[in-house]
Amino acid sequence: MRRLPPVLLEDGCPRELISLIRTILAACKEISFRVGQGALSGVLGSTLDENIQGETQKKLDVVTNQLLKDILLESGYVKAIASEEEDYTVAGNPDAEYIVAFDPLDGSSNTDINSLVGTIFSIMKAPEGSDAADQSIFMQPGKNQVAAGYVLYGPCTTLALTTGKGTRFFTLDKTHGTFLLTQDFAQVPEDTNEYAINASNQRHWQPAMQSYIDDLMAGETGPRARNFNMRWIAAMVGDVHRVLCRGGLFTYPTDTKDPNKPNKLRLLYEANPMAMLIEQAGGIASTGTERIMDIQPDAIHQRVAVILGSKNEVETCLGYHK
Ligand code: AFP
């Protein structure tokens, strides 16, 4: 089986970018080990702190953030980082070409129940001549990403990666500590009978999403004239992995549950990298009104509505939003 560096070299991926990706993966191998140790490593449970987004931090949120932050800033390959767990961006090597946004441990509420979690990352180039300490270097649309991926810590540790030449899966060979190519050019099936949404928010959704989900739930007796199945892992990384593997529609739509927080998922380190992986596998990623990767961000922790997955099903859902 082929290792990650030669696969990316054949794609013409710059050596510096490959080194940066390998740096991220070095931290992810360590995270994979710690997550796998569970209660034995003493990192389950919550801290007493909240992050800037008002969410209680899990101990593993803090540990994984520190691991990624240290390794990236010490590597010399990054000009700055933005993390779900950092209030502001952090400056790195002023002469470096790349910037990295990441969610160190997506779905961290799953850690204490031995369920799926993952690391999500997005890599862009810093604008030429920019200042490493300037937060605005991250204010670029997702279409500027040069690479995006996630590492899913499940029964096995899987990397989904794109550098703009398709989406590939690599599996961590834990004996040798190497990511090996296990699927070239993943393709999201265009049709699906599976969807993922937190249905407990139904009464807070906007009318378009209410109607769409009503029609799915009506099954073969409704306007769609067939039955649909629902799945919800409570970790976007797990839900998107399922969609990449066998199709589906994943959405976290706008809702009115908390008027100060109409959307849940973060643009820079959740929606954008997932959108790139999905589009590179033939799927669609939208907010309901626009392509996610076209959004011009205006804040590091900006949140957006997300509807992504199988092309025909996402288009059907978007039809309800017109
Ligand atoms: P955390 O990374 O803070 O655990 O949040 C996970 C997440 O942002 C996303 O991965 C899930 O799809 C979503 O939250 C789950 O939300 P609910 O709590 O509404 O199920």
Image: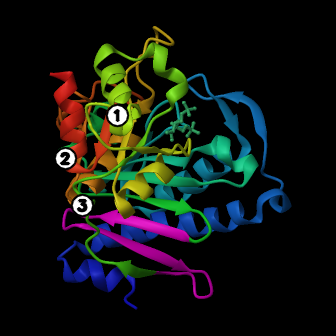
Q: CA distance from mark 2 to mark 1?
A: 21 Å
Q: Is mark 1 within 8 Å of ligand 1?
A: no
SS for dot 1: helix
Extent of the magenta region: 157-179
Q: Nearer the viewer, residue 60 or 198?
A: 198
Disc 1 packing (10 Å; few <14; some 14–19; many ≥20): few
Q: Find residue 281 and name its label.
A: 3
Disc 3 packing (10 Å; few <14; some 14–19; many ≥20): many
Q: Nearer the viewer, residue 208 or 99?
A: 208
Does residue 271 appear to the left or right of 124 in the view shown? right
Badge 2 amino acid:
Asn
Badge 3 amino acid:
Ala
As drawn, 180 above or below 219: below
As drawn, 216 above or below 192: above
> At 50% across and 29% down in the image, what residue appears?
199
Q: Earlier in the sequence, mark 2 or mark 1?
A: 1
Q: Quadrant of residue 30?
A: bottom right
160 within the magenta span: yes
> At 58% across and 88% down in the image, what residue appears?
176
Residue on which disc 2 sits: 312
Residue on which disc 1 sits: 221
177 within the magenta span: yes
Q: Nearer the viewer, residue 114 or 219?
A: 219
SS for dot 2: helix
Tags 2 and 1 in contact by the CB under 8 Å rule?
A: no
